[in-house]
Image (cartoon, rainbow, N blue to C red):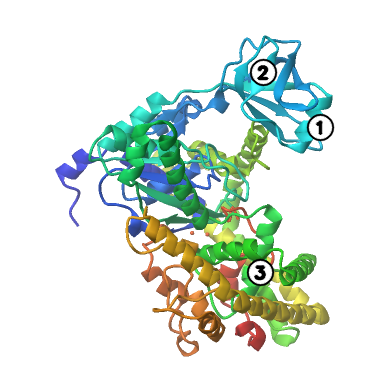
Amino acid sequence: MTGPSSSSLVSLRPYDLVVFMFTVFLNIFFREVKLRGVQNIPKSGPVIFVIAPHHNQFIDPLIIATNTPRRIGFLAAAKSMQRKFVGSMGRALESIPVVRPQDLAFPGVGTVKFATPDNHSEILISNGTTEKLHVRAVISVKLPAPHSKRIAMEVAEIVSETLVRLKSPVTDPDAIQLLAAKEYPFSITPHVEQAELFNSVSQRLSEGRCVGIFPEGGSHDRSSLLPIKAGVAIMALSAMAKYENLSVKIVPVSLNYFHPHRFRSRAVVEYGEPIAVSQDWVDRYKEGGQPKRDATQELLNLITMNLKEMTITAPDYETLMLIQATRRLYKPLNRKLSTTQTVSLTRRFVQGYIRFKDDPQVVALQDRVSNYNKKLLTFGIHDHQVQRSEIGGYPLVLLLWSRIVRLIILSTMALPGVIMNLPMMLITGYISNLKAKQALAESNVKITGRDVVSTWKLLIAMALIPLFFVLYTILFYLYLGFLGLTFSTRLTYTLCFWFSLASLSYAAVLTSEVALDIIKSLRPLIGAITQKKDFEWLRKERAELAQKIQEFCEKTGPLIEKEMRERRERLRLEGGFESDSVSDFGKSPFTSPAGSGTETDGSLANRVRASRQTLLQRVGSYPKFPTPQAEDQTALDGSAAKSEKPSRAPLSESIVYTASEDDGYAGYDEDEDAPTVKSDLRMRKPHSTSQR
């Protein structure tokens, strides 16, 4: 194999070296990263990558940079760029610094309350003045417990030294009640003009380069998207208004994590169809005034809609757990979904839940699924383990002992590496949790601060691993000297030890994963031997729930399909997509692929009812499910992989999900895919009700 040509070496930039370095680290940190829709990335020309949700602070841009075939200059907080290591990496990655108003916030002098109890548009400052306030600045008040939320109020006019008129009246009922009765300390967030930032972005786009932006404005750990800021729309329109004949494409990108704060988790990166910025929007943007605002808002609405359809967003964490549990019950037990298929199916179940959440049948199903989940939690097992193992019998006893023996062997093999890695694990865990608490205290949107945990784990590990390897090598050399070996022998053994440390450490990680999978399988196995009646109840309840969920999907599928078809047709007629084909992101979670020609609701219902397998073919890029006769020879993930770009590594709420994470029971995904346990499970023929 020939080496790289001189021209390719000349074209290498610090960006490529940093991306290569982080590719190695991310391959170790994540078990799997799946890519979907890479073919949607334009091969040339200016592109703005709009990425959401922003659930993993500095990890998010690194995952995009290491999995995208084009160089991307990300917008990065100027505050972060001032840090020594992060700033140097950001500059190497050609990031564009942006001054965020929240980074300039400072405590106000005095206290605030409503000027009068009935006027919610004017704020009175006591024991202070409006000297440091100006128009468009934001006054923030943190309400005390049990409300524990922050109220932001934009200044429209400085009436006097102690009186401020707001741009819009306060509408939050808790804030109205508290600010009318009592004075509270406040902070001031100044308005920042971003003309320099927009000029930098326009210049980069005019050169045919790519820009990456996280439009939520900051990382968070919520189960829903934060409001999408208008900056991305302004960047695209201002660049095309400034440079004639410039055609900017906007590519929406979704990041969906399975346990984003955990080491060796999974992620899915999905690239949507490019959005073409129409010339009509640009012309109206040039007019200024109301036409400019309308054009910006229309483009922003289109971007927001695409991001919401690509990501898994739920009203709250509990709802997300419920939806994941329902998806697990709906999927046939004899079908295995890939990571991207799991995310896609969950996304469309979210759409269906939001549409029918007030339906009495959905409310009843919600209670039953929640109760089923509680039972699983009581027994300490996962949903896929309910039907997949025999109940009682001598073979199960042998299986239990065989797994215990395997666990002992694997634990013995992993023990040296685990001992070697343990100090680093403890230090990274402690510091990352400390940083999460600090980030939570400084944020208005974070829930637990988990969005910064993985970032700090990776950064600290990058510093500690070389340090500890040097320490272990020195100790090993001193030990050889204690044994009385000659210098040349000690040097040879020490060099061999140094080069084997990385392999030993990584092997311990992989072996520990297998051992943990076996540990997770022991409790349900013991329960199947000792608690036969309880497990029989779980099986019966699961079968009934699967039947009820399937029937509801069959009933509501035609309606969802019709609504989604009409919506996609409106989008196609309104324009904005790069191609005539309509994205699959808006399709119903309950319906099968649309056929050609016009169909009645009755034919749709018949088609939906005909096969749940056909419905599942809609997940991902229409993978072909194997027939029962061919299942021994064809794996679903294999067929799905043909329709996707190759993924990095052999990687998965935030589920992510991003979106968030699963509760570890009926919604849990990772344990189901554990190869070491699944290989020796004694399979039981599924009930017909859960196999339909």
What whole-number distance in Å separates the C-alpha atoms at marks 1 and 3? Answer: 40 Å
- Label 1 residue SS: helix
Q: Earlier in the sequence, mark 1 or mark 3?
A: 1
Q: Residue visible at 55% across and 65% down? A: 348
Q: Which residue is mark 1?
A: 177
Dots 1 and 2: beta carbons under 8 Å? no
**Can you see residue 439?**
yes
For badge 3, the amino acid type reads Thr
- Picture quarter with the C terminus: bottom right
Residue 55: where, in percent of width, then height?
55, 46
- Closest to the camera, between mark 2 and mark 3, is 2
Quarter where residue 211 is shown: top left
Q: Which residue is mark 2?
A: 164
Dots 1 and 3: beta carbons under 8 Å? no
Q: Residue visible at 54% across and 26% down? A: 101
Quarter where residue 653 is shown: bottom right
